[in-house]
């Protein structure tokens, strides 16, 4: 979950590409794109303070609602 929060934090700055975020988080660009798409669908794509205040369980439930 730490990577998900870091992906969303870096994306919220608007200064990094998916490739740069992937390199920083040690994951693939497709993983970054998938997380950002889920965040967009959950209406969390630009709300870093809200995301940061969420527990890992809350964030996971918002990003992966079909799995809960």
Image (cartoon, rainbow, N blue to C red):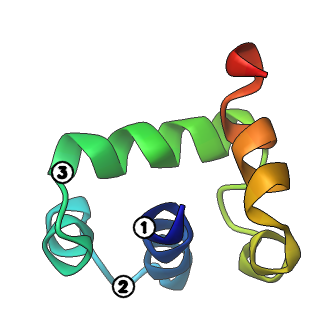
Tell which of 55 and 36 is nearer to you. 55
**3 or 2: tag closer to the N-terminus:** 2
Q: Residue 19, position in %: x, y?
A: 14, 63
- Check disc 3 and report its element: helix, strand or loop: helix
Residue 62, compared with residue 66, is above or below; it is below
User: Mark 3–mark 1 contact, CB under 8 Å?
Assistant: no
Q: Which residue is mark 2?
A: 15
Instruction: Looking at the picture, tell me which residue is in the foreground, 60 or 29.
Output: 60
Q: Which mark is residue 60?
A: none
Q: Residues within 10 Å of mark 1 (few under 14, many from 20)?
A: some
Quarter that holds the N terminus: bottom right
Alpha carbon distance from label 1 to label 2? 18 Å
Assign the C terminus to one quadrant of the image: top right
Which residue in the structure is indicated by mark 3?
A: 29
Mark 3 and mark 1 lie on one chain; the one further toward the N terminus is 1
Between disc 3 and disc 1, the foreground one is 1
User: CA separation, marks 3 and 2?
Assistant: 15 Å
Locate residue 65, reporting x and y percent: 76, 24
Mark 1 lies on residue? 3
Q: Is residue 64 left or right of residue 9?
A: right
Number of numbered markers: 3
Q: Which one is in front, 59 or 45?
A: 59
- Give left or right: position of 22 versus 53: left
């Amino acid at each position: 979950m730490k990577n998900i929060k870091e992906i969303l934090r870096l994306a919220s700055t608007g200064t990094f590409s998916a490739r740069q975020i992937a390199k920083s988080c040690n994951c693939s660009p497709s993983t970054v794109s998938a997380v950002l798409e889920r965040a967009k669908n959950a209406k969390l794509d630009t709300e870093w303070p809200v995301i940061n205040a969420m527990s890992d369980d809350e964030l996971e439930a918002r990003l992966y609602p079909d799995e809960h």
